[in-house]
Amino acid sequence: MKPEDNKFHKGNGVDGKHYWLTPPKLMNILQLEFNFDFDPCPFPKPDNFDGLTCEWGKSNYVNPPFGSIIHNGKKKGATAWVRKAIFEAEKGKDVVLVYPIDKWILMLLEAGAEV
């Protein structure tokens, strides 16, 4: 079945992937607060751009792919982006990382848990 023939494809790009872009209003608010100078996960991604191996900026907005990707011949997921974010933060850089929150985490937060 072609992606465009699948009812779950609505909102996907022509490449068959679904992109969860940050709403412009929210992005403007975050930009004012954090003054981002780099996006290691730009959309659309330029050819030959690799946010997992390049040097990040001083203030970074990271909205990574939530599914797995093939990177340098290996399967990489959200953990790879978290590791890279930690590595860059340890250099003194600011990193705002978008990360999916599952329903059970929300339930724990409602019950008083801290993240």
Image (cartoon, helix red, strand yellow):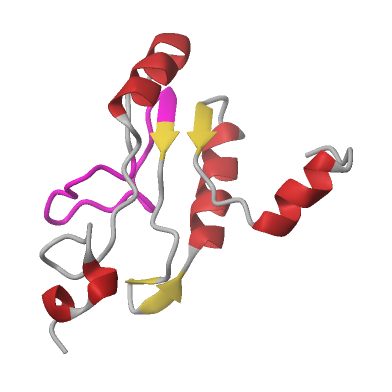
For the stretch drawn in magenta, the main secondary structure is loop
Query: Quarter-wise, where is residue 19 in the image?
Result: bottom left
Indicate the position of residue 30 as horizontal and vertical percent values: 43, 19
Q: Which residues are magenta?
A: 40-60
Residue at figure coordinates x 40%, y 43% from the top left: 63
Relative side of 35 to 108, left or right: left
Give 114 or 47, whichever is nearer the viewer.
114
Return the x and y of residue 100 as percentages of the image width and height.
55, 51
Where's the C terminus, which quadrant? top right
The relative height of residue 79 versus residue 58 in the rendered view (above or below) is below
Q: Which is more toward the observer, 2 or 57?
A: 2
Image spot of residue 17 (x, y percent):
25, 66
Asked whether residue 19 is drawn in magenta, I would say no
Relative depth, front residue between 49 and 55: 49
At horizontal 32% and vertical 29% (from top left) the residue drawn is 38
> Which residue reaches farthest front?
7
In the image, residue 17 above or below residue 61: below
- Of all residues, the one furthest to the right in this rendering is 112
93 over 77 or under it: above or below: above
